[in-house]
Structures are given as structure tokens and as C-alpha cells.
Image (tube, rainbow, N blue to C red):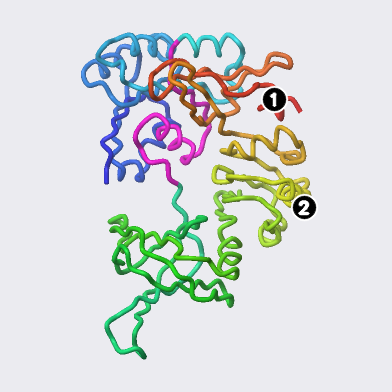
Amino acid sequence: MGTGVRVVATNNVAIFRHLAAPPLARLGVTYELVADHAELMRAIAADPPAVALVDVDLAGGNGYAACRDIKDAPASRGTRVALILPPRGLMPIDRAVIDRLADSGCDDVIAPPLTADDFYAHLAQLTSLPLRRDRRIAVELDVDLPTALPAEESTASVPGQVTNVGAGGVGLRLESPLVVGTQLAARFRVGDQVSPDTRAVVAWCRAADPLEGGHAAGLTWDGEVPLRTRLLLEQVALFDVSEEHGSLTVMLHGDFTEMTRFEALALRLTGVNDVTFDLAAVRYISSAGVRAWCELLEGLRGAKKRFRHCSIAFASQAAMVPLVLADGEVVSLEAPYYCDPCGRDEVRLLEVGAIAREGDRILVPRLTCGACGAPTELDDIPERYFAFLNQ
């Protein structure tokens, strides 16, 4: 279902490419491109959008002043403004830039280049867009449904695919719908591994994306989950791998604990010379999980490694244990912000290109609160949270 989010953006090629992507159109995101400061202000005055994406190097003016003008105008005060920095290396990010960003009253800062997922994350933290990361986990399953037939024929099997795995249940992709509230037995298969029957309840079911067809559903566990089921799902839910232009992206999920085994991922990365790790869905890392992760990176010595959308759990470990990054580069990470006036915590995505360094000091953007619009502060000591930048 579309959300009706309208965006006005200055004519930045990298931003336009993401705005024009089909997934945003399916969510109801529409956009208008403007060429300069005057055209930007006319477009916003005529129909204030939900979001304005404004280059700091704006033709006919500058993005900092434009942002302040948008925020000061009563009609557009509710428009969330993200300022777009030049690509890394084209403009020094120093204290003066950080101060100008703060004075502008901007709600977010974007530092290209960035991936489509990270661009979407920025839009999601500015608007009502759902922050979701759809997955297709290679797990086949059969769902046995109770029927009104005699006992010897009392179940009907429905095949499907797992799309997500959580502690409380699984997400599914199915050809046929399931009735909410139905109790059922599910069997999961990965290669020659098959789980025992696992009791679950249909928590929700809806038609899937019209372009893909079928139905999406969610099951919650009904009672204790068999150990074999839990281990099988943890194994396959740990990572996904995609390849584009000779570079691999590995999306990691869940918790890194004493139960985590990276052998399958290490085998998949054998001989790889360029890899990006997406860590947005890593929720928790124990000391045993850190050791397992560092052993994985040791096997990738010499390969080019980037770490993108590092979760707070991962970034916190990277600040304390340098080997968590080995010789790799952090591209973007989540950071905790706090609004003192309304007592609200927020997790915001930052590109490293939007962070300034002044000797040993780390200077991060001050962003406005999504609830009250007041300036927020990093809810940690910058030199501690971003310690890996000075390592």
C-alpha cells in the first residue's frame, strides 16, 4: 500500500537514481526535481513536501541557507530537510561544516555515495515509510493444515518459502493464503536437513506485492521450538550473499554468540578479493561472537573489506576491539541520538563522510528530533563511540 510521501530534490544524479527506483514508486513515493535555490523555494511554497533533499552546493545560493529558509517559513515548517554533502573527497568535512549544518536546522545529512538500502533508511527515518529489509532465505517448508477429513487424511500440505526468521517465529511467502489463528505444523528443509514438525500459529496473512503475486504470512511459535528446528533456522538466517560488478555484499542477521558458526560463510568467501558487509540487522554480539567474527576476517586478510550500515551493537564492538574491523573500512553506521527537551531516543544512520575529525576530536552532525524538532545530541562520547576512526 502506498504511503503518499512527496519529495522535492535538487538535481543530484546520485539522489535521482535512488528516487527513481521502482520500489519507492510502489510505496507511493513521488518526487519533483528542481534546478536551483529559486526553483526549490517556489516548489516548496506551492506545495510543501514531506521531505526536501537539498545539496549544500546549491546553484543560485547554498543549501544551508535554503534549509534555514524552509524551516523559518510557516507553511513549510513541517517539511523534513536532509542536506546532501558533495561526494567524499570533494569538500573537506571540518568544524565549520559541522557548525553550518547545525545552524541550518537540518533534520538529516546524507554523504554520497550510498547504496539504495541506505538511501531508503534515510527516507524512513524522516517519514512514515516502513523501515524494513525484505529477505528471501533459501528454506523450503511444508505447512500441514488441519482439515475436516478422516484421521488418516487429516492434514493438507502447503509449500512455501521462508522470507525472514526471528526469535518468535518466521515470515513466509506462499501461493495460497492461510487463515489467521490457524494452528499448524511446519517442516523446514535445507538440502538434506529436515526439521521435525514444529508447532506454530498463523499470526497474520495478506496479499503479497502485486508484481510478485502470492501471499505473505507470519507464523509465531506455539510452545517450545525443537532444537533441530532452531539450529537449522539459525544456520540459514545468519547471512545472505549477492554479487554485482565483481563485488560481493554479505548481509548478516541476528546475534553473534557462542552458537554462531561462520564456516559456511568462510567457504562462500574463499578467494574473494572485494566484499562489503551489511550489518544493519546484527542485534547483539557476545565476546564469543567477537572471536568467531575475527576468525572469519583473518581468513580474508588482503581482501578489500567495507562495513556498511553497522548496527549499534556492531559499532560498539568495533570501537572496543580493533580486530572487529581488521584492515577494513567503515562506510556508514547507526548512532544513538538523544533529544533533551522531549526525552526521546533515536537511532540515526550516518555516513562516515558526514563526520569531521579535528586532531583527536570527533565532530558529528547535530540533527533535529523527529518528534519535537529540537536539536539532538549524540548519546555517547564521540571519541569513544567512533574510536575506530582514529585507530
Residue 381 pos. (x, y %): 65, 21
The answer to whether any part of residue 83 appears in the image is: yes
- Residue 126, position in %: x, y? 39, 29
Q: Say whether residue 368 is left or right of residue 22.
A: right
Which mark is nearer the camera, 1 or 2? 1
Label 2 Cα crowd, 10 Å radius (few <14 / some 14-19 / many 20+): some
Three-letter code for the amino acid on which mark 2 is drawn: Gly
The magenta-colored residue range is 104-132
- Number of marks drawn: 2
The residue positioned 52% from the left and 29% from the top of the image is: 112
Seen from the viewer's position, the closer of residues 163 and 375 is: 375
Q: Is residue 130 magenta?
A: yes
Secondary structure at numbered mark 2 = loop
Horizontally, residue 5 falls left or right of residue 105, namely left
> Crowding near pointer 1: few (<14 within 10 Å), some, many (20+)?
some
- Residue 157 location, quadrant: bottom left
Give the amino acid type for the residue marked by disc 1 in the picture: Arg
As rendered, which of 74 and 82 lies closer to the eye? 74
Disc 2 designates what residue? 299
Location of residue 380 in the rendering, given as x and y in whole percent from the top left corner:
62, 24
Write down the residue under mark 1.
384
Mark 1 and 2 residues: CB-CB less than 8 Å, in contact? no
Q: Is residue 333 magenta?
A: no
